[in-house]
Image (cartoon, rainbow, N blue to C red):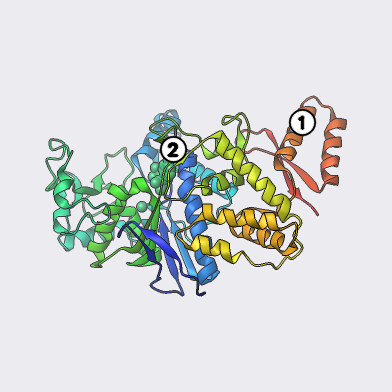
Amino acid sequence: MTDKILRIYNTLTRAKEDFSPIDPGNVRMYVCGPTVYDFAHIGNARPVIVFDVLFRLLRHLYGDDHVTYARNITDVDDKINDRALRDFGKDIASGKLSLNEAIRRVTEKTANQFHDDVKALGCLPPTFEPRATEFVEPRPDGKTDMVGLIQGLIARGHAYEANGEVLFDISSMPDYGQLSKRPLDQQQAGARIAVDAHKKSPGDFVLWKLSSPEEPGWNSPWGRGRPGWHIECSAMSAAYLGEVFDIHGGGLDLIFPHHENEIAQSRCAHGTAVMANYWLHNGFLQVEGRKMSKSEGNFVTIYDLLHTEKFGGRKWPGEVLRLAMLMTHYREPIDFSVRKLEEAENTLRKWKRVADTATDTDAAVSGELLSRLADDLGTYSGFQVLNELAAEASEQSEAASVLKASLAFLGFDMSHAGVDEAEVSARIAERLAFIAQKNWAEADRIRDALLAEGVQLKDGKDPATGQRVTTWEVKR
Ligand code: AMP
Ligand code: ZN
């Protein structure tokens, strides 16, 4: 614990508040994770990066062992089923694969890719990363499960069965709508009455729906079926963080209906006044003023940005995307562009050049940076502090050491400090071209020259494409 006060903007109260954890010995945060049907785009990377910075800050303030961060993986969703049918339709038709096996292949591949992606962006793994499919039915370890939560909601009069579904009854919760500030009577707006004739109120949402024999399903008191989207986060957050916890995060688009409905389920199932005390939401990553999304078709995947030349005609290091993302305050929209990445790359290069002159390996993270971050995660403002440190370093050598420690704290890999990554990438590409021409002498010359500069190359194969890839590390 330190005396530094963290202030964060709480969507629940629409105000910046002092953060006061329920238990400083175990600060608990939940963030909604990806639905694993397709590669994540760089808009999806924004909450992962933003909440990684918050995770690091909380660990600094309360101690590494006193923060629990849970981020789920949504591996049950109709989009996943559609993808499995699209990619493995023939194998399913010929009986080579069952639908469930095909689904598992889609979710495993996508989840592994997600892990590779966010690791390359400098994000720490969360403390727990539960998968929705493991929390549908009652568990041997007794952790909260979705079927159990839904049974509890029915027993308490907050849910009902109709037309092959179990629905949450929003009229049973007088203060439904507090997060999105939509009072009950406005929930009617835009509802499709004809389609929703079986609902008591148009805003009632699905907790459970029956599956046809070809759809994935689990046994339940209401028949073989599958959960609605919102109930999974209520189950997994309770399983790892308890009925009431400190921070719940995600992108702005999740405020309604997802987070509103998580709150309704959790509060009504547990009879609590809140689900989480602080609700944090990041703004959108936009392209020409529109939210980047799969449905708009205006997206760039993290994989493509890092490993192909589809964006700006070149590959981009993960840490450049990380910095570009944090140059804007997390609640503001970001308009994404090649220029933004170039600006981040230049800044990072400048900082690393200075950090490479650091002599004190025990230097502390800049206290001024921590203060800026403690003011609602002021990363942009914090970067001004890093610029000042970089400027001071020529006269005052401790500044370079503090800068280095601060960059490492923010999740930038400092083992490469002082190496021009774009230059190394260019020379690796040159070497690969020589290898393709079987010009081993030139290829070896580049390898040896880099080694003399402290950069050791390692040749390997891309598991996805089978192509030769070269990675590198700094040996000093
Ligand atoms: P989804 O897979 O669409 O549920 O999104 C996963 C996470 O990414 C959620 O927290 C979303 O709010 C967030 N997200 C999706 N698109 C964007 C975007 N363009 N900018 C920022 N966050 C986004
Ligand atoms: Zn969620």
Q: Is mark 2 within 8 Å of ligand 1?
A: yes
Please indicate, yes or no, whether residue 41 appears anywhere in the rendered image.
Answer: yes
Q: Is residue 408 above or below residue 202?
A: below
Decide: few, some or many residues near mark 2? Use Cα within 10 Å; few <14, some 14-19, many ≥20. some
Q: Residue at x 77, y 43 (%)?
A: 457
Of 429 and 163, the residue lying toward us: 429
Give me the C-alpha separation between circle 1 and circle 2.
34 Å
The image quadrant in which ligand 1 is located: top left
Please indicate, yes or no, whether residue 227 appears anywhere in the rendered image.
Answer: no
Q: Which mark is residue 286?
A: 2
Residue to which mark 1 is pinned? 430
Instruction: Name the amino acid, label 2.
Output: Gln
Decide: few, some or many residues near mark 1? Use Cα within 10 Å; few <14, some 14-19, many ≥20. some
Quadrant for residue 36, please give it.
top left
Instruction: Name the amino acid, label 1.
Output: Glu
Q: Residue at x 32, y 39 (%)?
A: 215
